[in-house]
Amino acid sequence: MTLSVVEPILNEAANIADLVAEIVQALVGVTEFEIIYVDDGSEDDSLAILTRLKAEVAQLRVIRHSKRVGQSAGTYSGVQAARGNLIVTLDGDGQNDPADIPKLLAAFNAADDRAYRMVTGHRVNRRDSLSKRIGSRLANRVRSRLLNDANPDTGCALKLFEREMFLRLPYFDHMHRFLPALAKRAGCHVTVVPVNHRGRLHGQSKYSNFGRLIVGIPDLLGVAWLMRRAPRALDREEM
């Protein structure tokens, strides 16, 4: 089993080296793995740092978008390029803790045998600003009410899932915000585990509460429509 760690980034030069080292430390001796950084048109030194690290870290692969196309597109590029059958996603800002990846793997392996499985993190001790925590809490309540996805923290980027399952999901911009609901729609068994959350040490967030709200409302309504139109399971046999 090979695990592909997929990280889409935008202007995260100061966080790359430490995070790559943490991922290697967390996974060496645990499983075979690769690390796929997808540089979404960064304008800082991200690409130069990744190019240097690629010569030093055998597991590191680098993909670059010529222009910014967004986190969902970055995730999709990374998953498409992945050689592993299992995918882990996490943010490139260092707020997700790579030390939690083995915990997600254990939960994945412990889940009962289903067609597809997904494990998502729940940031129980948020290290964001008060306004961001309040905005996230309200958004989670509204989303949960409309989608009935039974997920307390769909905004947590730390997720583990099967590559094949992901590539069967409907793809659209901002889909990464709704992965647990889309996976559930596809008949996937979703497990939630508590994970660590850390404050951002370098750089600044690329999103504001207002920005998330503006793009999130039509996306939420669209996903709610998809959930209501989910295909029914077919009970069939070949005669």
Image: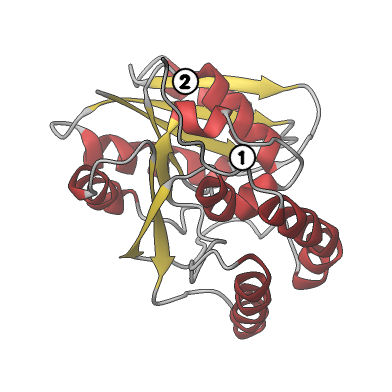
* Mark 1 lies on residue: 9
Residue 3, above or below 101:
above
Q: Residue at x 72, y 48 (%)?
A: 174
Q: Position of residue 96 (x, y in %)?
A: 43, 56
Picture quadrant where residue 33 is located: top left
The C terminus appears in which quarter of the rendering? Answer: top left
Q: Residue at x 70, y 35 (%)?
A: 171
Would residue 157 appear left or right of 135 to someone viewing this image?
A: left
Q: Residue at x 28, y 34 (%)?
A: 24
* Mark 2 lies on residue: 82
Q: Position of residue 162 (x, y in %)?
A: 41, 33
Q: Nearer the viewer, residue 44 or 233?
A: 233
Q: Nearer the viewer, residue 24 or 125?
A: 125
Q: Looking at numbered disc 2 in the image, what kind of residue is underneath it?
A: Ala
Q: Circle 2: is it few (<14), some (14-19), or many (20+) Cα within 10 Å? A: many
Give SS at disc 2. Answer: loop
Can I make out residue 110 in this image? Answer: yes
Give SS at disc 1. Answer: strand
